[in-house]
């Protein structure tokens, strides 16, 4: 095992009533330079005491600094002895939460790293049965238990076992141990599909009327009269089929699925209570997938849980640290494009109210690809990208718990001032400064509003890696701005010097309409991760309906190929190069794909009176381009043709949207129709912008 350095570890147990108990600790040199030259070896601690009348005994070991020296602990009583060999003193963390924390290494992108681990690294893990129960048992104790069912230590070289542990926890341990060069252990205790109320002690739930009422409202409350009882109205198989059934209803309006491990306090009783008085440096928390519909409630429950952590665990004098993650982008609601954003906003806002030193990580920039299959973790709600989750938790832990040259939390906006028609933002936890994501040149992800306008997509620019200025030429009196505030926000690309993305935010909490991102309009990518249908739990999901990488642009008619071109662009990382033929009699028709569920269709352009398209003509001849719009009622309109001039430079085509005979709030198609009298040729397109802002 690994014990926490710089604390007096509590050793306790049971023996015969009033029996004498002897404890001995021996130290053996490792030969590694971390060991102090003045360290004593051999028998370094011995103590005797008598057990209490019920047989309980307790000792406290001396305080040690971390090293690779091995220790042996011997406990003797009533003619018996227990010997614990190969003990190290170093750093200890506890990792827990729900499905994204419990996701095993073998299902993630961490799996390739396991082959490089070895037993001599001083990296160790402790785990227990995933549900906390004894094998063969199906029922949870109403009261906290003292036993750890299936508990076992694993060394880093036990590859088959490591593959079953939390991927995020293993990635965290690998990165942190490499930085600290100390023995390190992680207690991997997460449980999939778990609600926060199952991790709270029952006493906390009963004493807090708001938490208790919430658990009642979602029909998860149990007391002694119905403990370990499933809902009488339906069997488990019926509940499963109901949760998978396709429906047009918003899933948040339905009763939440129930399982016995989500009885109030059940996981606390079996997966936290047995570790009372454990000495550790900090806690990793990645949970909320099941609770994200209730951000206000979560802002009350999480501080309550952190207070429990603070009281039940021992830590060095610097105090217990708490590192937690925001939720991964997902189709959190069929109806609300910002439901996940509200929950992540709550996670960010609560950080300074927690009773522990806390650091937050962001993750919306990470790939959403997932393993497809029939297993529990073969779901878009559990993406494979866990290595970077663990690495970011490690980097925050280094700044928060160890005061190394790392930010103690994700970079965040801490202030804004108005300068004319612009907002000037300042930031904290950005390390050596804010910057765009590696390889990108155009700052994306900001929206801005005036006193009475909706949030519209805004321009932004970072200033000397210190501040960001945000504006929209048609918003003369900006009141507020927001950043990456949506369920899907991967195009947002501002981060700190360590690569950690900026915490999404809005400057005010007033609910107002917000434009959803239009990633296709930047013309610097041809594909992205999308949810193609409205409900990811639909039986229709499969094959082409599965979430995955899909095209942003589509060829509707004609013959053409699309490529990205980084060397000829108007702005951003690239433009789209379109090479075509047979566009002389029948027009080449192409445009963005607008019906992905994760883009919350239909497309709403009613705020704008003009569409501006940047285009580059590669041939010395005039071509024409028209704009086709269609709405949900199958009404269609085609603009007058605009001339693409015979010039070898970027030019702007302006299409009028105002007064078009379609419903601009509910567009299903936006196509460009190209005619070229020579039939064959090519063009570049870049930066589709909407101007002429109008609102009532």
Image: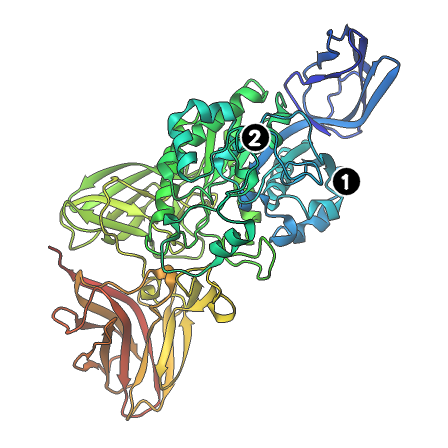
Q: Which of the 4 image quadrants contains residue 668?
A: bottom left
Which residue is label 2 attached to?
268
Q: Please tell me whether residue 589 is drawn above or below residue 163 in the rendered image.
A: below
Q: Earlier in the sequence, mark 1 or mark 2?
A: 1
Badge 1 vs badge 2, beta-carbon distance below 8 Å: no
Numbered-mark total: 2
Looking at the rendered structure, which numbered label has been put on residue 119? Answer: 1
Q: Please tell me whether residue 246 is drawn above or below residue 382 in the rendered image.
A: below
Residue 56 appears at what percent x and percent y? 72, 12
Give the camera-side residue of 246 and 683: 246
Residue lying farthest to the right in this orientation: 79
Residue 400 lies left or right of residue 315; in this view the side is left
Disc 1 versus disc 2: distance between alpha carbons?
32 Å
Residue 484 appears at what percent x and percent y? 35, 49
**Comparing labels 1 and 2, the label whose residue is closer to the camera:** 2
- Residue at 38%, 56% in the rendered image: 491
Q: Quadrant of the C terminus?
A: bottom left
- Residue at 29%, 92% in the rendered image: 584
Helix, strand or loop at label 2? It is helix
Q: Which of the 4 image quadrants contains residue 535?
A: bottom left
Helix, strand or loop at label 1? It is helix
Residue 6 appears at what percent x and percent y? 63, 19
- Residue at 30%, 92% in the rendered image: 678
- Residue at 68%, 47% in the rendered image: 164
Q: Quadrant of the N terminus?
A: top right
């Amino acid at each position: 095992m690994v014990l926490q350095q710089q604390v007096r570890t509590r050793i306790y147990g049971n023996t015969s009533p009033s029996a004498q108990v002897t404890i001995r600790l021996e130290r053996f040199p490792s030969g590694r330079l971390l060991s102090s030259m003045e360290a004593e070896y051999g028998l370094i601690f011995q103590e005797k005491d008598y057990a209490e009348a019920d047989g309980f005994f307790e000792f406290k070991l001396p305080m040690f600094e971390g090293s690779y020296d091995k220790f042996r602990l011997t406990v003797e009583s009533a003619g018996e002895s227990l010997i614990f060999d190969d003990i190290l003193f170093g750093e200890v963390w506890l990792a827990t939460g729900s499905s994204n924390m419990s996701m095993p290494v073998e299902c993630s992108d961490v799996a390739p790293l396991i082959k490089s681990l070895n037993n001599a690294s001083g990296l160790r893990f402790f785990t227990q049965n995933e549900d906390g129960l004894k094998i063969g048992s199906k029922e949870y104790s109403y009261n906290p238990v003292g036993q750890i069912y299936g508990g076992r230590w694993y060394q880093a070289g036990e590859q088959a076992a490591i593959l079953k542990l939390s991927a995020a926890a293993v990635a965290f341990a690998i990165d942190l141990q490499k930085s600290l060069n100390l023995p390190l252990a992680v207690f991997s205790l997460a449980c999939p599909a778990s609600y926060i109320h199952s991790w709270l002690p029952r006493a906390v739930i009963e004493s807090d009327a708001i938490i208790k009422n919430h658990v009642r409202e979602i029909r998860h409350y149990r007391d002694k009269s119905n403990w370990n009882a499933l809902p009488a109205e339906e069997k488990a198989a019926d509940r499963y089929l109901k949760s998978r059934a396709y429906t047009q209803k918003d899933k948040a309006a339905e009763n939440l699925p129930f399982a016995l491990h989500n009885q109030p306090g059940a996981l606390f009783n079996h997966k936290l209570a047995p570790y009372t008085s454990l000495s550790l440096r900090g806690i990793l928390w990645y949970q909320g997938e099941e609770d994200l519909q209730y951000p206000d409630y979560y802002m009350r429950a999480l501080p309550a849980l952190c207070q429990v952590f603070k009281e039940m665990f021992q830590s060095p004098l610097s105090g217990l640290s708490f590192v937690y993650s925001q939720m991964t982008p997902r189709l959190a609601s069929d109806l609300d494009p910002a439901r996940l954003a509200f929950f992540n906003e709550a996670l960010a806002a609560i950080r300074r109210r927690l009773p522990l030193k806390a650091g937050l990580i962001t993750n919306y920039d990470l790939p959403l690809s997932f393993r497809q299959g029939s297993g529990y973790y073969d779901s878009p709600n559990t993406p494979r990208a866990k290595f970077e989750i663990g690495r970011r938790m490690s980097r925050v832990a280094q700044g928060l718990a160890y005061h190394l040259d790392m930010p103690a939390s994700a970079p965040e906006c801490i202030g804004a001032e108005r300068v004319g028609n612009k907002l000037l933002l300042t930031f904290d936890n950005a390390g050596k400064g804010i910057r765009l994501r590696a390889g990108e040149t155009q700052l994306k992800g900001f929206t801005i509003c005036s006193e009475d306008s909706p949030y519209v997509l805004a321009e932004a620019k970072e200033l000397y890696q210190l501040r960001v200025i945000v504006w929209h030429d048609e918003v003369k009196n900006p009141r507020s701005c927001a950043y990456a505030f949506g369920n899907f926000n991967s195009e947002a690309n501002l981060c700190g010097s360590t690569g950690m993305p900026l915490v999404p935010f809005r400057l005010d909490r007033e609910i107002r309409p917000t434009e959803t991102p239009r990633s296709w309009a930047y013309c610097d990518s041809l594909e992205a991760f999308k949810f193609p249908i409205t409900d990811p739990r639909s039986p229709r999901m499969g094959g082409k309906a599965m979430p995955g990488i899909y095209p942003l642009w589509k060829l509707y008619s004609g013959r053409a190929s699309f490529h990205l071109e980084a060397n000829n662009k108007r702005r951003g990382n690239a433009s789209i190069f379109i090479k075509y033929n047979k566009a002389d009699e029948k027009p080449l028709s192409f445009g963005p794909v607008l019906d992905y569920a994760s883009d919350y269709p239909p497309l709403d352009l009613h705020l704008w009176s003009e569409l501006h398209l940047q285009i580059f003509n590669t041939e010395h001849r005039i071509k024409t381009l028209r704009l086709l719009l269609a709405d949900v009622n199958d009404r269609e309109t085609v603009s007058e043709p605009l001339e693409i001039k015979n010039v070898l430079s970027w030019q702007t085509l302006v299409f009028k949207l105002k007064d078009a005979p379609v419903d601009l709030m509910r567009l299903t198609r936006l196509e460009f129709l190209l005619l070229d009298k020579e039939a064959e040729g090519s063009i570049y397109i870049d930066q589709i912008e909407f101007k002429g802002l109008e609102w009532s």
